[in-house]
Image (cartoon, helix red, strand yellow):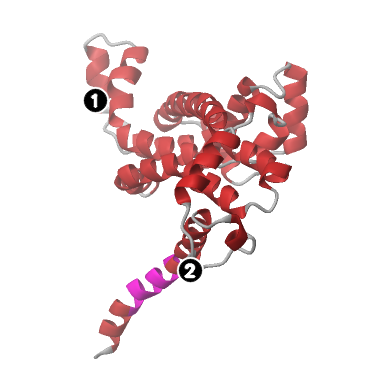
Amino acid sequence: MNLPAVRHLLRPATVLVLALVTIGIPLWLVLVTSAKPQGEAIKPNLTLPHHWQPGTNYRTALAEGQMWRGFLNSVLVVVPSVVLVLLLGAGAAWIFARRKGRLVAAAYALSISGLLLPPAVITIVMDLRQLGIANTQPGMIAVYTGMYLSTAIFFMTGFIRTLPYELEEAARIDGASSWTVFWRIILPLLRPVIATATIMVMLFAWSDVFYAFFVLGGGPDATLPLNLYQVASAALYLNNWHLIFAYVALMSLPMVAVFVVAQRRIISGITNGAVK
């Protein structure tokens, strides 16, 4: 077998091994531990359980872990954040893609600087307190919108620049206003990138616990990851790794389903928005 053929076989094998190590092993650990009784799960490992009880563990996690309340709180925070990121990002990207000048270029650079500069947690909390929305869901929505707006603007601007400007000119000749052009031409053409931005923001915001901890601070408005942190720190889940991993598995199901269904749109949207 010649060298090019060996390289051709080695690359996919390397990718499979890396995926197995970085994704497969942690996933297997979560699944098998969530199916074990407490005695076998005290020290989590990769061995199969001697006694399977996934149903009991999942029911306990749902009933005693307050998952339904956390699920509702996550939906009430993530969905408005995604909508705001898409609308504000699409509008800003349209302006950046169609207008020229140093001021526009500087504004675009500032808008996408969030891709490189991490948010300052202390400053965010202080600003939210000044606005009176600290420890509230609107405050959390504002934080997520600001955090992920740079990503949406970056992908959408690159995609809009590939669209023929003649489409907008033809609509304006027919009497369409800027608002009509945006809603009826730009947004429909942005569907691949909108799908990508939607899934990316949902994945990040759904699993976030760091910023939710500082902004929401727990309580009845805690999202799913923050609620998991609270119950895992309480006596209820102390050393109950089988319940903690059952909670993690249930919490991940919505995003796993979204990712499996829309993975092709993610790849096409990233390609169209960043490469073209």
What residue appears at the point 51 percent right and 53 percent down from the top-left corner?
Answer: 34
Quadrant of the rendered structure where residue 234 is?
top right
Where residue 178 sits in the image (x, y, percent)? 36, 14
Amino acid type indicated by mark 2: Val
Is 183 on the left or on the right of 157, as rendered? left
Label 1: which secondary element: helix
Residue 126, image quadrant: top right
Disc number for residue 167: 1
17 falls in the magenta region: yes
Place of residue 25 in the rendered image (x, y in percent of width and height, measured from the top left): 48, 65
Nearer to us in this view, 4 or 229: 229
Magenta stretch, main secondary structure class: helix
Q: Residue furthest bottom?
A: 1
Residue 265 appears anywhere in the view = no
Residue 240: image tag:
none
First along the sequence among labels 2 and 1: 2
Q: CA distance from mark 2 to mark 1?
A: 48 Å
Q: Amino acid at mark 1?
A: Leu
Left or right of residue 53: residue 267 = left
The reply to whether the magenta stretch includes residue 113 is: no
Q: Position of residue 237 (x, y in %)?
A: 66, 46
Residue that numbered label 2 is attached to: 21
Q: Is 71 displayed left or right of 197 in the figure? A: right
Q: Residue at x 42, y 27 (%)?
A: 90
Q: The magenta stretch spans which residues?
A: 10-19
Where's residue 144, x and y in %? 58, 32
> Residue at position x 57%, y 53% from top?
242
- Which residue is more in the foreground, 196 or 109? 196
